[in-house]
Amino acid sequence: MAFYCQKDSYAIELSTEVVSCTPAKLQTDNGGGKKETLSGYNVTLTDTVLFPEGGGQPDDRGLIGETHVLRVTRRGPEAIHFVTSPLEPGTQVLVKVDWQRRFDHMQQHSGQHLITAIADSLYGYKTTSWELGRQRSTIELDTPAVTAQQADAIEGEANRLIRQHVPVTVRIIGIDDPEFDQVRSRGLPDDHAGPVRIIDMEGVDANMCCGTHVANLSDLQAVKILGMEKGKKNKTNLIFIVGERLLQYATRSYATERSLTALLKNGPEQHVEAVDKLQKSVKMLQKNNLSLLRDLAVLIASDFKNHPDRAKVFSLHRKEGDNEFMNIIANEIGTEDTVVFLTVGDEKTSGLFLLAGPPRIVDDLGPRVCKILDGKGAGKGGRFQGKANKMSQRGEAERLLQEVTSTESEQ
């Protein structure tokens, strides 16, 4: 069965009838990786203008009356619409599609067919899968590599055919039709029933597909292959965008270009060179800073060791520093008779800590200091170090060390 949306991809609404409405649940992703389960209803209609997911294309969104449709899936010959409010079977309803989402999917899907056909005809590269992403899409080609020249040729031919206003037609044939074995296909779903749809780009490609497509390649506007990346099992992924996505991409890119021009004080053609120089300068400054920190660590330790009345506990916090900085101080001071408590990072939030000293003290106090700082760490051989999440508690940890070492001195 072909749904109304498959017969006319440009249809934006349809008057139809509710056939059934049953309680159901839907698991969704809120975008942050957390799953949420919604309670609602699965609704079937006499026909639908909303495309159920399939053929690599996501499902449509829209309305049944005033009720938002949150998911559309295919179950055999039926389209299942998930809604959060019940609908009475037998009711006549008006179904409307989110046209912006639909047309975007039409452009990306037809663009995929076009790129796939050209990659095959020019180089014999077969498409093994594809994904219609939220911002960009990928085509997996059965080849270990695609050169930049080949990608340019595929893109160039795609845009030439778009300018040629090539018609795209949908034909329906039976699985016993001789043409069935001749058109390009990656196979039918196990639960497929009835005839199949052929998406025919005149003189370019004929391919079995259940998705929604443009009626003319000119509706794609333009195709851009953004790049290639290594795929699975010796395959290559082409990353591409089509139509309105390409216009949005150009708008974002131009905004970025203007911002970089203002920050770097030069023209777009000099941005890469300017950023390269900045990176090299930052690396040199970081290297010099590390060298200075090492020298500072030695001086700090030397100053403590030469103090005539040096204490049993040496405590220091410094915003700038790292584990090497702290370990140099501990090594230079020596921890046979001295407890060294060092921290680096933001004094109110998080950072790193090191507790070094006689093993009997560090083994006992290391986990306690770590707990006070809400940190994670480990230690052995008279050293305990890790990450602190509450550097604001540093004073409490230092008081604990002072109390314990004072008690030991009195015994």
Image (tube, rainbow, N blue to C red):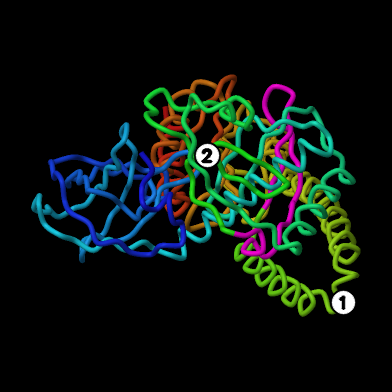
Question: Is 69 included in the stretch rendered in magenta?
Answer: no
Return the mark for residue 267.
1
Q: Give the image location of residue 34, x and y in percent.
A: 36, 43
Secondary-structure class at tag 1 = loop
Q: How many marks?
A: 2
**Left/right of residue 77 with respect to residue 359 in the rendered view:** left
Amino acid type shown at disc 1: Gly
Q: Quadrant of residue 68?
A: bottom left
The image shows residue 335 at horizontal and vertical percentages of 63, 30
Q: Quadrant of residue 368?
A: top left
Relative image position of residue 392 (x, y in whole percent): 44, 54
Q: What residue is shown with label 2?
A: 209
Q: Amino acid at mark 2?
A: Cys
The N terminus appears in which quarter of the rendering?
top left
Q: Is residue 131 above or below residue 68?
A: above
Q: Residue at x 76, y 53 (%)?
A: 158
Please tell me which of labels 2 and 1 falls first in the chain.
Answer: 2
> What quarter of the picture does the C terminus occupy?
top left
> Is residue 369 visible to us here?
yes
Boundaries of the magenta span = 216-240
Task: Identify the secondary structure beneath mark 2.
Answer: loop
Q: Report the front residue among 389 and 120.
A: 120
The answer to whether residue 345 is above or below residue 260 is above
> Does the magenta segment cover residue 219?
yes
Q: Nearer the viewer, mark 2 or mark 1?
A: 2
Q: Are marks 2 and 1 in contact (CB under 8 Å)?
A: no
